[in-house]
């Protein structure tokens, strides 16, 4: 594939925020990716759905609150945010708990989306 | 085939970098081209020249540098992740270079496959 | 597509999510601690065996050998070396590591 062509990049997030740095550092990748004009989508599965649970208040643990960055994704033209239906249900969460507009999809549907990608990055 | 590799964990704690190394070496033996290895998260710790394993252990940093030099692999350490963890040009091992996250995206665009190793 | 799992199914849910997500015709490669899923008598074995009807299961032999588990390999799992790992990556248009 030559330069200038658009590839489909999917970022899979399966880890909870704060306990490890993966959520924050994968968000940094996504923001950089936006500058490359690729077709970007994000999938939040398993504990990754906790990254979008609205209402982060990180003052007490003295780390940067990166949740507002998810709300900025739209400004970067990143609108495809998929959240795993089974993961929400298993964690007592609903779409209303999410800090940004998302598309709720089953694992099987996310699996189908994965098959259509050129590059999948997971953190 | 052009193959890019992403390594998300440091040496000696997780198996990720060992698996990635053995995968890269096998890919080269099969005639593929490993174009770039991108070190992210704690993976940046694979690039410090201060690493001194016991003599009877594998030298993870040096063997990456050697494989890179022999086969023209671009060994790129993420600048933001590196600075957070105290990896700078003054302690960077030879054969590695520090650059931005854009190099990871570029690897994904230019390579035919991108394989991630992590925890 | 190729799914790569490096976690023990007795410790993490990576394999379960992978198997629930993988589409028919796909391949799953077990590496590192993921190879414990390819062994007999575990509480995860039935799930893996069931998945074999839909996806092809591979395990990295050097990782089984290193863990002393090569004498416990589940029937239907195909063993590969690092060269076989490379071939699987090349054969499938995209791969996902279930970290």
Image: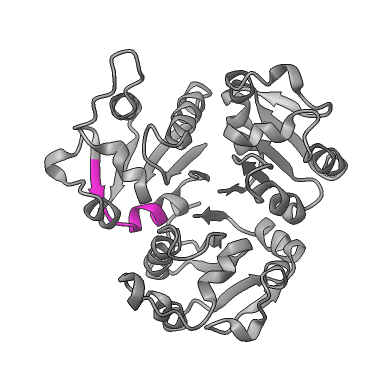
Q: Is residue B100 magenta?
A: yes
Res. C90 in view = no
Q: Position of residue B98 (x, y in %)?
A: 23, 47
User: Horizontally, is C73 left or right of A25 in the view?
Assistant: right
Q: Position of residue A1 (x, y in %)?
A: 51, 51
The residue at the point 85 percent across, 40 percent down is: C46
Left/right of residue B19 with respect to residue C1 in the rendered view: left
Q: Residue reaching furthest top?
A: B56
* Side of B60 where A78 appears, left or right: right
Residue A8 in view of the camera: yes
Residue that lies at the very extreme toward the left in this rendered image: B90
Q: Which span is picked out in magenta?
A: B97-106
Query: Quick one: C75 or B104, which is closer to the camera?
Result: C75
The percent coordinates of residue A24 (x first, y second) are 40, 65
Q: Which residue is depicted at the point 66% across and 45% down?
A: C3
Position of A67 with respect to B93 (left or right) is right
In the picture shown, does residue B102 fall above or below B75? below
Toward which corner of the image does residue B59 lie, by quadrant?
top left
Q: How is the image coloured?
A: one colour
Corner quadrant of residue C90: top right
Is C59 included in the stretch rendered in magenta?
Answer: no
Q: Nearer the viewer, residue A115 or C61?
A: C61
- Residue drawn at the location 29% of the way across and 18% of the way down: B54
Q: Is residue C15 above or below residue C64?
A: below
Q: Residue at x 81, y 50 (%)?
A: C24
Nearer-the-camera pick, A3 or B92: B92
Measuring from the top left, give residue A41's x and y in whole percent. Answer: 55, 68
Near-viewer residue (B34 or A17): A17
Q: How many marks?
A: 0
Q: Can you say whether A22 is above or below B91 in the image?
A: below
């Amino acid at each position: 594939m030559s330069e200038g062509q658009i590839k489909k990049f999917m970022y899979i997030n399966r880890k909870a925020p704060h306990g490890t740095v993966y959520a924050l550092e994968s968000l940094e990748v996504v923001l950089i990716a936006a500058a490359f004009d690729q077709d970007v989508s994000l999938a939040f599965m398993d504990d990754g759905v906790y990254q979008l649970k609205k209402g982060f208040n990180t003052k007490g643990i003295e780390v940067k609150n990166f949740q507002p960055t998810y709300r900025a994704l739209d400004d970067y033209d990143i609108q495809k945010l998929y959240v795993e239906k089974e993961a929400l249900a298993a964690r007592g969460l609903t779409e209303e708990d999410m800090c940004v507009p998302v598309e709720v999809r089953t694992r099987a549907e996310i699996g189908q989306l994965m098959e259509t990608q050129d590059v999948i990055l997971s953190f | 085939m052009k193959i890019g590799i992403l390594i998300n964990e440091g040496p000696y704690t997780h198996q990720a970098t060992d698996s990635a190394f053995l995968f890269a070496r096998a890919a080269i033996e099969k005639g593929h081209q490993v174009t770039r290895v991108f070190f992210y998260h704690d993976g940046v710790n694979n690039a410090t020249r201060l690493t001194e394993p016991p003599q009877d252990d594998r030298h993870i940093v040096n063997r990456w540098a050697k494989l890179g030099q022999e086969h023209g692999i671009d060994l790129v350490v993420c600048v933001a992740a590196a600075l957070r963890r105290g990896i700078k040009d003054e302690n960077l091992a030879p054969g590695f270079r520090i650059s931005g996250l854009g190099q990871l995206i570029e690897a994904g665009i230019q390579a035919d496959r991108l394989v991630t190793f992590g925890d | 597509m190729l799914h790569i799992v490096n976690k023990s199914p007795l410790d993490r849910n990576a394999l379960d999510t992978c198997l629930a997500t993988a589409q028919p015709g796909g391949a799953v490669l077990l590496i590192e601690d993921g190879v414990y899923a390819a062994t007999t008598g575990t509480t995860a074995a039935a799930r893996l065996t069931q998945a074999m009807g839909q996806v092809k299961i591979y395990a990295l032999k050097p990782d089984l050998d290193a863990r002393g588990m090569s004498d416990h390999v589940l029937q239907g799992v195909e063993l590969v070396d690092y060269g076989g790992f490379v071939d699987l990556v090349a054969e499938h248009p995209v791969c996902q590591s279930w970290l």
